[in-house]
Image (cartoon, rainbow, N blue to C red):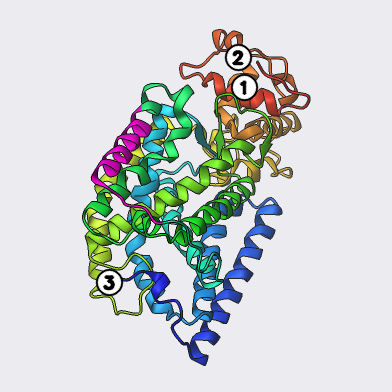
Amino acid sequence: MRRASANLNTPSGAPKRILGALVLMAAAGFHWLAWVRAGSGSLNWGTWFYHGAWWSYIAALSGVLCLAGWDLTAVLRRLVIMLPWSVVWWLAFDLYGLRLRNWYYVMVPPAAGARWLGYWTAFATVIPLTMLTHETLLVAGLFRGAKWRPFRVTQARRRALTMAGMACFVLPLALPRCFYPLTWLFAPALIEPWLVGRGVPCLLAEVSEGRPATLLRLLVTGLVVGGLWELFNHGASGRWIYTVPGLERGKLFEMPVPGFLGFPPFAVGTYSFWTLTATRLGIAPGLSSERMVRPLRKAAASLALTLPFCLAGFALVDRGTVRSHAPVAGDLPGWEPIMSARGRSAEELCAHAGSPHVSPSVRDRWCRLLKMAHHRGMGLPRAMELEALGIATPSELRHQEARQLLRRWPGANPPRPEEIAVWGAAAPGGNSR
C-alpha cells in the first residue's frame, strides 16, 4: 500500500489551483467570521465556535493540498470515511477519561439532540486535522530526506513494545493520579508492533529502515494542532476544562504548560490508529492518486459500524464528563411572566429590560446569577446553589475551602472538589485550597 509521501509530487493543472485558492479563501473568511462573532458575545457562535474554527481549518488545509496539486474529490473521499472513525478514536479517550477525571465539559447545548450532534461533529475533526496538518508539512518539505541509523524490529522488540503499551494502558486506570501522562503513549506502542508483524507499511517500519521523517513531522504536527486545540477551546463558551493533578497553575489558555508535551505522542497515536483502520478498510491511509473504490459505501459501512458505540459513549459522556449546560430562559427563577421567552437563551431574557412583567430586582438577580454561571462554566444550577449558601459573586469563592463547602452543599448532586478548586483559582485574587 503506497503512502501519501510517495504521491505528493503529482503535477497539477490550473483548475485545481484555482479551486484550491477559492476553498482556502472561503475557509479563511468563515474562520475570521467565527472569531468575530464569538468575540462579540454571540451565544450561538460561542457555543459552536470550536466546531466552526476546526472545520474551516480542515477546509483551508484541503485548499492548500489542492494548490499543491491534489484533486479535491480525492481529499473528500478519504475525509468522509475518516469521520466516523475519528469520533470513535476520541470517544475512546473520553471514556478512558471517566476514570482519569483530568478534564470535563461545560456550557454544552442543553438539548440532547444538539449536544450529541456537537459531540459527533467535534470528535470527527481529530483524525482529519491531524492527517491534513501532517500532509501539509509534508508538502512544505519539512524533514524531507531525514535519515538515521536503521535497526531491526525483531519479534522480541515487538513483544517488548507491546508489553510497554499494555502497561501504559493499565497503569493510568489503576493509579490515575500517578500515571495519567502514560495515557497518550499506549496507542502507538500497541498498534505499531501489530502492523509491522503483518507486513503493513507503517510508522515503525519507516523508522526501523532509517527514515524518521514521518515521525518527526508527526511530532511537529502534535505541537501545532495541540496549540490550536487549546486556542480554539479558549475562544469558545462551550469548552473543556482541565483538572490535572499537580498542574493547576501555570496554564497557557486552558492547558497546563507541561501538558502540551502530550500532544506530539497523541498525534503519533492518531496516525497509527488511522493506518490500522485504513488497512482494515482496504484503503490507503494517506492521500493517493489511485481512485478509491466505492468510497460512499465504505463511509456508510463505517458509520453503521461505529454508530452504536458512539451513541452509548455519548450517553456516558453526558453522565460523567459534562458538568454544565448553556443557560436557557427556563432555567432562570421567575421567568414565567414572559411567556415569549420560551426557547430563548437566559442572556436574552436578562437583557429584556423593557418588560413591565419583570422588576429591576429580579433582573439584577438574573444578571448576577448569569455572571456567576459563566464563571469557569459552572452553570446556572450551581450558581443558584451557591447563592443559597450566601455566595453570590465569583470573588466570594476565593476564600472557600472545597471540603467545608461540600459539607454545606444544598443540592443532592454536589460538584466535584476539583471543580470548586477551579472556580476558586479563577476568582479575582483566588486561591482555592
In this view of the protein, which residue sits in the foreground, 136 or 324?
136
Q: Nearer the viewer, residue 430 or 127?
A: 127
**Residue 327 visible in the shown view:** no
Q: Which mark is residue 421?
A: 1
Query: Where 342 sits versus 60, above or below?
Result: above
Q: Residue furthest right?
A: 429
Q: Position of residue 25 (x, y in %)?
A: 61, 76
Task: From the image, tell me which residue sits under label 3.
Answer: 295
Which residue is at a point 57% across and 70% down the rendered structure image? 27
Up-down relation of residue 173 to residue 377 (above or below): above
Measured Cα–Cα span from mark 2 to mark 1:
7 Å
What residue would you read off at disc 2? Answer: 402
What segment carries the magenta color? 150-170
Residue 167 belongs to the span the image colors magenta: yes
Vertical order, 14 against 363 (above or below): below
Q: Secondary structure at mark 1?
A: helix
Front one among 90 and 113: 90
Q: Are marks 2 and 3 in contact (CB under 8 Å)?
A: no
The image quarter containing residue 4 is: bottom left
Name the amino acid, label 1.
Ala
The magenta stretch spans residue 42:
no
Which mark is drawn over residue 160? none
Dominant SS of magenta comes to: helix
Left or right: 54 in relation to 76? right
